[in-house]
Structure formats: C-alpha cells, structure tokens
C-alpha cells in the first residue's frame, strides 16, 4: 500500500515538473519565429507570397528573384522599372502576419553594375507593410492603397545613398528622404496596435528610431515583407493602371538588392506601456522604445 502511494506521488510529482516546464517555456516561445528566413535554403522561396499573383495582375515586375543562388545566404531581388507611389503598385515579397510584430533585415542596394549606389531616381529596397487588397485587374479602382515602408538605396539624388520612408493612406503618399550610411543597412519595423515604428542602425551600430506613424486604418492582418523599386523617371510616364498590369522592359532600371535575412518576432511589451500612444514621443521616448525594441531583438532565431 505504502509502495503504491509512493509510486503515485512520484508520478504526480513528475507530471507537475513537466507541466511547470511547459508553462515556463510557453511564454518564451515566439509564435512568429517560424516565419523567419535566413535565406540559406533555395526551397524556402516557396514560402513567400507575391502581390502580383494574389491580385492576378499577370505582370511579374522582378527580372530575378532567388535565394542562396546569386549570393550565398541571401535573397536577391532585381526589379524591372516599377514603383510604389499613390496608385502605382510595385513589387512586394511577403508573408501574412496578424497582430503585433517586429521584423528585421539587413539589406544591400547597389547599381546593376555593382559598383556603388544606383544611378536612377528612386531605386531602393527595404521593409514594407501593406493592407491586403481583395481586387483583380477587372475590379481594381484607384484610391485603395494603404501601406508604409522604410527603404534604402537612391532616392532623389542618384549616385548617393539615402533612406526613404513612405506612408500611404487611400493612395495618398507622403515621403521623407534622409542620408544613409552606405551600401548596406540594418533596418527594423515594429507594429504595436495602431502604431508603427521604423528603426535603423546608425554608424556606431546602435539602433535609432527613424520614424513613427499612427495608422488606425490598418487591419489585424497585414502583408509584411520586402519591396524593391527603381527608375521613377520611366514609371511616371505611365498611368497606374497600365503600370500595374505591365512589365516595363524599355525602361532603365538600376538596382540589385540582396537581403541577408528576414526575421519575425512577437514583441513583448512592458505592462507599464499599456494604453500609451507608442507613436507619440511625448508618451514614450526613443530611449524607452529602444530599451525593448532595440538590441534585445537582435538575437538570431534558434536553428
């Protein structure tokens, strides 16, 4: 009898230990980590979605897309003449994400000759966040684009490296341009409810808050991924509806973009932040944001 009791107690104790371990591990598990891609397996290209396919445009504006082929351990994107602005719809290689997230990448942008910055206006690559559209070329109407992005390459000064941020609401685009550090940049985008934070690393390798946006119009599920675009001079010669359904082969594109990785994470926010407007620096300073959303998110996902 006593032996049976001891066996039962040992079994119960073991169950409690296992349950305790599961409970302890549960909060540490990142449900978005599985979306990350280190770009070391060409087969992972099949896990990425393309907007032109989802919306049935039948116009692939990428001349080249591959993983671990053009450059070892990287995704390479080489766009034809195309862009994102107002109702012009360009390239987006993405995954669907619900709720809060943080995404980080290191992106390199060069001219097609590979010898420095692109030499055509608005030739950039970066992180894009977009509201999905349930449209086809037949049902598409202007005024329906909603997105934001942080890109790196050449903006309005061909032959120099710049950042471009753009927020577009109902196809009304607002952009800002600043200088960047060189051909390669590490950038991050974070969603916290209605608030979107765009971060970049400075010359010292420290994270800085680049821009903040309040976008209460964005739905729960978004397209999150990589964009590339180039050769605005030739893009603006076309109407958006024509551009969106056409591969422009007579332009002068000048961009090769390579992404070293694309890492997703679910940010864990301190309880004392709850209820604050994260896009308002008066309610949450840059230093406070970076204490949670900066270097603490730099750890590569477990392999």
Image (cartoon, grey):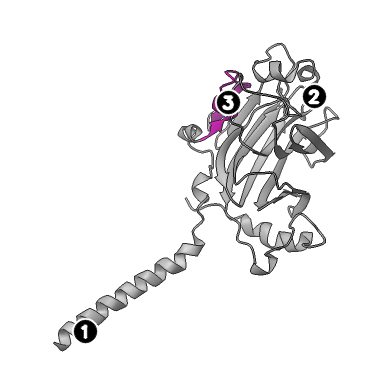
Side of 80 relative to 71 (left or right): right
Determine whether 176 is above or below 301 in the image: above
Residue placed furthest toward the left? 1
Q: Position of residue 132 (x, y in %)?
A: 61, 35
Side of 108 relative to 181 (left or right): left
Determine whether 271 is above or below 179 in the image: below
Dot 1 falls on a residue whose secondary structure is helix
Q: Residues within 10 Å of mark 3 (few under 14, many from 20)?
A: some
Residue for badge 1: 6
Residue appearing at x 72%, y 46% in the figure: 215
Residue for badge 2: 119
Q: Picture quarter containing residue 137?
A: top right
Determine whether 128 is above or below 79 in the image: below
Q: Quick one: 213 or 15, which is closer to the camera?
A: 213
Dot 2 falls on a residue whose secondary structure is loop
Q: Which residues are magenta?
A: 48-67
Residue for badge 3: 55
Residue appearing at x 61%, y 32% in the figure: 133
Q: Quick check: can you spot residue 74?
A: no
Q: Earlier in the sequence, mark 2 or mark 1?
A: 1
* Camera-side mark, 3 or 2: 3
């Amino acid at each position: 009898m006593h032996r049976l009791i001891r066996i039962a107690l040992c079994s119960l104790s073991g169950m409690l230990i296992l349950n305790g371990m599961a409970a302890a591990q549960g909060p540490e598990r990142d449900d978005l980590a599985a979306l990350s891609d280190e770009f070391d397996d060409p087969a992972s290209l099949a896990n990425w979605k393309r907007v032109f396919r989802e919306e049935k445009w039948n116009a692939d504006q990428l001349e080249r897309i591959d993983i671990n082929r053009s450059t070892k351990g990287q995704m390479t994107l080489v766009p034809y003449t195309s862009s994102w602005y107002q109702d012009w719809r360009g390239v987006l290689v993405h995954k669907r994400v619900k709720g809060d997230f943080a995404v980080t990448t290191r992106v390199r942008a060069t001219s097609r000759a590979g010898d420095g910055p692109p030499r055509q206006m608005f030739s950039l690559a970066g992180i894009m966040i977009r509201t999905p559209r349930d449209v086809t070329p037949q049902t598409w109407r202007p005024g329906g684009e909603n997105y934001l992005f942080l890109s790196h390459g050449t903006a309005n000064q061909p032959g120099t490296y710049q950042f471009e941020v753009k927020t577009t609401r109902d196809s009304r685009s607002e952009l800002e341009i600043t200088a960047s550090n060189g051909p390669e940049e590490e950038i991050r985008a974070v969603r916290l409810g209605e608030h979107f934070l765009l971060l970049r690393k400075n010359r010292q390798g420290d994270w800085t808050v680049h821009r903040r946006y309040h976008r209460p119009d964005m739905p729960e599920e978004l397209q999150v991924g990589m964009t590339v675009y180039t050769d605005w001079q030739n893009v603006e010669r076309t109407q958006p509806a024509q551009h969106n359904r056409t591969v422009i082969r007579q332009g002068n594109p000048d961009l090769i973009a390579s992404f070293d990785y694309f890492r997703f994470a679910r940010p864990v926010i301190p309880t004392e932040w709850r209820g604050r407007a994260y896009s308002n620096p008066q309610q949450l300073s840059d230093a406070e944001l970076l204490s949670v959303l900066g270097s603490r998110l730099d750890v590569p996902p477990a392999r």
